[in-house]
Amino acid sequence: MGEAEEAPGVSNGEALELLMSMASSSLACCVSQFPAKWQSIKDMLHQLCCRLNSLCSGIGADGDGNDDDEEHPVLAELLRLASATVRSIQVVASQCSDGSYKGGRLRLRSDLDNLSCKLDAHMKQLKEMASSGVPSPSKAIVAVRPSVEASVGEKAFYLKDLFSRIRIGGTVQRSQALATIRELLAEDEFCAKVVALDVDDGIALLTGFLESTEACIQEEAAGAVAVVASSECYRGMLVKAGVIAPLVQLLENTDTASELGKERAAHALRELTENSDNVWAVCAHGGLATLLHACAGAGSSSKLISSSFAVLRNLSRVEEVKMFMVEQGVVTELVKLSQKKEEVRKLGAVELLHAMALDDADVREEAVGMGVIQSLLQLIYPDFPYSYKAREVALAAIWFFCFSSANSLDDLISSDVLGWLLFYLNNGDYAVLECTLKILRHLSEVSEEYNRMMGRAGYLSALSSLLGAKSCRVREMAAQVLSSLLMLHPNRVIFIQDGDSLNKLLQLLDPAEGKLMAKDLILSAIMSLAETHSGRKKIVASENFCCLKELADSGDFDAKKIVRKLSNNRLQTIFSKIWSV
């Protein structure tokens, strides 16, 4: 239902004659699925033609081509927009009559609602023009823009003045007024209330300008709609005004729409689909294919790609829509996008796949089978210039996708992933550290072979260093992994050989350190070390053995158990020396 394009040089009278011809054709059609809605549209269409004819006759629109559209630009613009609406009505009505309409019942209802809102907006503008006359832009009185600290009343007055300008102005004036409206909406959330509730047809006007043939007007209208849509209170009003269809059309318009206009349209859809009730309307208007195309488009900007993926994540939250997405082959397309070089595409695709697969084993298996793990490994490869945010997302997804089956886990370990994870233990920020430790914790629980591999790779020293981290969560997870690794005798031998690591471990038991949140895990690790003769010897000889002893003296059960084990071993050593004499 695109906007009509008028031939250059057509007078207002000729435009009106064409509009009435299309209206007459539409009125002869029948829409049997929604008879009441169709009858309402027919009534408004008849009234629109009568009032336009009366208004044009009153100002001499007799079709003689005497530059009437230059003398009355507001009337010319109204005729252009009304013709576009009537042409859309004619297309839908004729398709319904001959049975060629393929949009389905949901799409038809949305189309009829959208057309009804547009007719209503035209009727209200006609009423305003009839009561106040058709003004000339040159005679407009321009109000002064209020400051940020201005009163609510001043801002409301100025906003209403701006909407008067976009009703009567030409392209430049409208673009400037819409830009100012967008700026005011972003400055003060109260302005959204004024536009939605106090300005006559404020929402409908913004929606209508999304279908302008001028890119600058589309951009500013989409920006204003996006700001209004950020307020949950007014999303319903926007959807009722038919805003979703033109937003989707703006996204898929490769001829006249600018990249900025598409970015703002995607942002608006992102805000609107935060309400799951609006998700179906996006799908009904072909939004799924349009959004995927925006994500994959070679010329798409980072902002457009990011917002388009966000809309798709919102769509996938509705289970029925997610099933539809899977049936349409979205999983395959997302895996392909995850294999692209650009971070914004890889990141968006991985996040969406992860979200879709969370409660769906079939989606997870399909994604793994298509090669998503290879894409995840690319994101965490330290030599590739991806952000910590991307690495964090990839690490979380690796934990989810790879631990679902033994084969996936073996594929993961057969890569150089252990070396990369060790790199992040030594160099990552806290978010990346947590994701890395989560993977290591599960690896340590899977098999002894993985534990041996980590012990030989140098993880023991790195983990002991993290026991003194500022983050309580990092300390606790590091202690869990270290405790698991030290259950193996070969790992204990490696750890004991590193005197610094043992000293750090014992020092953490000092109450003065204030980091005893992982005390039980630390004591568990020390107990494992005390299972070996060399371990007991190193513990007793450590300069921080006193920390363990003080903790035992304070009554801690596990600490007393370790100290008792160490004391018994010392007595046995003494007796063995006596007996050997």
Image (spheres, rainbow, N blue to C red):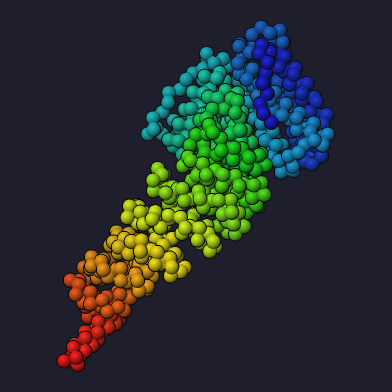
Q: Nearer the viewer, residue 352 or 174?
A: 352
The picture places residue 57, in percent across and down from the top left corner, at: 71, 14
Q: Is residue 172 left or right of residue 105?
A: left
Look at 48% across and 46% down and name the residue there. Answer: 347
Residue 319 placement: quadrant: bottom right
Q: Say whether residue 437 is visible.
A: yes
Query: In which quadrant of the rendered image does the C terminus lie?
Result: bottom left
Please tell me whether residue 405 is drawn above or below residue 47 in the rendered image: below
Q: Say whether residue 238 is visible.
A: no
Marker count (numbered): 0
Residue 54 placement: quadrant: top right
Look at 29% across and 59% down and name the residue there. Answer: 470
Please tell me whether residue 152 is drawn above or below residue 531 in the rendered image: above
The picture places residue 388, in percent across and down from the top left corner, at: 39, 48
Q: Is residue 543 left or right of residue 519?
A: left
Residue 202 placement: quadrant: top right
